[in-house]
């Protein structure tokens, strides 16, 4: 009983660590930092994802009113000329907007701040923001829930295989069911709402989120098949758990859907 509890705590800690790592390293995680300007420390958070319902607000906390800013942008992967607009003081912030784009449309932008004598570009490289469609919470939340628990039970199954527990097969079957529900059923529905296509992985595209879901499913399907035929084949559960862990280490949305304006007339 105590050993099982310890194994579950370990599985939860490992799963939460992977979720945090994936979130903080993904291309939709805001670019954060701080600069010293005009005798003030200005902290900023530059967003990299926004819904298609409106222009994307780019804002910097600046309650003193002493700092000016400008926003420079253009569509990503386009022949557009750069557009620069001043940021306005509004509610203790410097605010400007990126033009609304369709789902999978991207904008690249820079923010420059000035105290009247010194200008500071907040980032050396442009920040890339991708627009996405609105995904209903009734679809998104179950998808997140199922994928989280798929990772949790996968990790627990891997630990069980090492400890040679009898429940290795049970945990493996639960993992496979959660992957099917969260990744192969709800995942494409989320993708359709967000970017207009159910599947953009192989063989139709190179979306790593779709591809890594498929790889994880294949390995877990094999593991469950092998364990059903012979419960002593616990090593397959460990292999599948390692594969799922590795694919989870790939940041979410890498090589995701995007519009290439240079390929259009």
Image (spheres, rainbow, N blue to C red):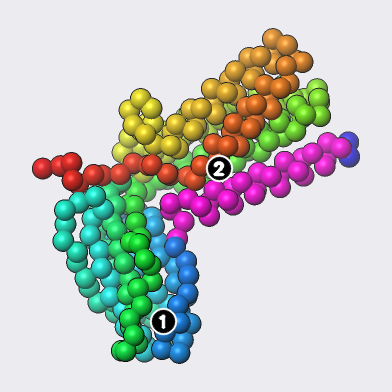
Which quadrant does the C terminus fall into? Answer: top left
- From what the image shows, is residue 150 above or below residue 68? above
Image: magenta residue range: 3-30
Q: Residue at x 59, y 47 (%)?
A: 19
Q: Magenta region's main secondary structure? A: helix
Q: Nearer the viewer, residue 140 or 35?
A: 35
> Is residue 180 toward the left or the right of residue 90 in the image?
right
Q: Could one spot residue 92 in this view of the protein?
A: yes
Q: Residue at x 81, y 25 (%)?
A: 164
What residue is shown with label 2? 249
User: Residue 28: x, y in percent?
Assistant: 43, 53
Q: How many marks?
A: 2
Q: Could one spot residue 189 in this view of the protein?
A: no
Q: Which residue is drawn at 71% across and 47% down?
A: 13
Which quadrant does the N terminus fall into? Answer: top right
User: Residue 141: x, y in percent?
Assistant: 52, 44
Q: How crowded is mark 2: few (under 14 residues within 10 Å), some or many (20 or more)?
A: some
Q: For residue 114, which quarter of the picture?
A: bottom left
User: Residue 249: x, y in percent?
Assistant: 55, 42
What residue is shown with label 1? 62
Q: Which residue is drawn at 24% across and 50% down?
A: 77
> Is residue 207 toward the left or the right of residue 107 in the image?
right
């Amino acid at each position: 009983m105590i050993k099982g509890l310890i194994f579950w705590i370990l599985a939860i800690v490992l799963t939460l660590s992977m979720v945090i790592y994936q979130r903080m390293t993904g291309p939709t995680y805001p670019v954060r930092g701080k600069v010293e300007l005009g005798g003030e420390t200005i902290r900023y958070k530059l967003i990299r994802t926004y819904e298609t319902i409106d222009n994307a607000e780019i804002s910097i906390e600046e309650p003193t009113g002493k700092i000016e800013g400008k926003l420079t942008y253009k569509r990503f992967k386009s022949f557009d000329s750069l557009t620069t607009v001043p940021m306005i003081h509004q509610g203790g912030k410097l605010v400007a907007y990126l033009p609304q784009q369709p789902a999978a449309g991207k904008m690249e932008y820079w923010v420059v701040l000035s105290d009247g004598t010194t200008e500071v570009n907040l980032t050396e490289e442009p920040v890339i923001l991708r627009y996405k469609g609105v995904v209903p919470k009734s679809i998104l939340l179950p998808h997140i829930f199922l994928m989280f628990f798929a990772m949790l039970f996968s990790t627990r199954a891997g630990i069980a295989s090492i400890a040679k527990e009898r429940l290795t097969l049970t945990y493996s079957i639960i993992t496979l069911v959660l992957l099917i529900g969260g990744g192969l059923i709800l995942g494409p529905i989320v993708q359709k709402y967000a970017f207009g296509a159910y599947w953009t992985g192989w063989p139709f595209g190179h979306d790593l989120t779709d591809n890594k879901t498929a790889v994880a499913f294949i390995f877990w399907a094999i593991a469950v098949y092998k364990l059903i035929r012979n419960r002593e084949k616990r090593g397959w559960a460990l292999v599948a758990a390692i594969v799922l862990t590795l694919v989870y280490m790939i940041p979410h949305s890498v090589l995701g859907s995007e519009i290439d304006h240079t390929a259009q007339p």
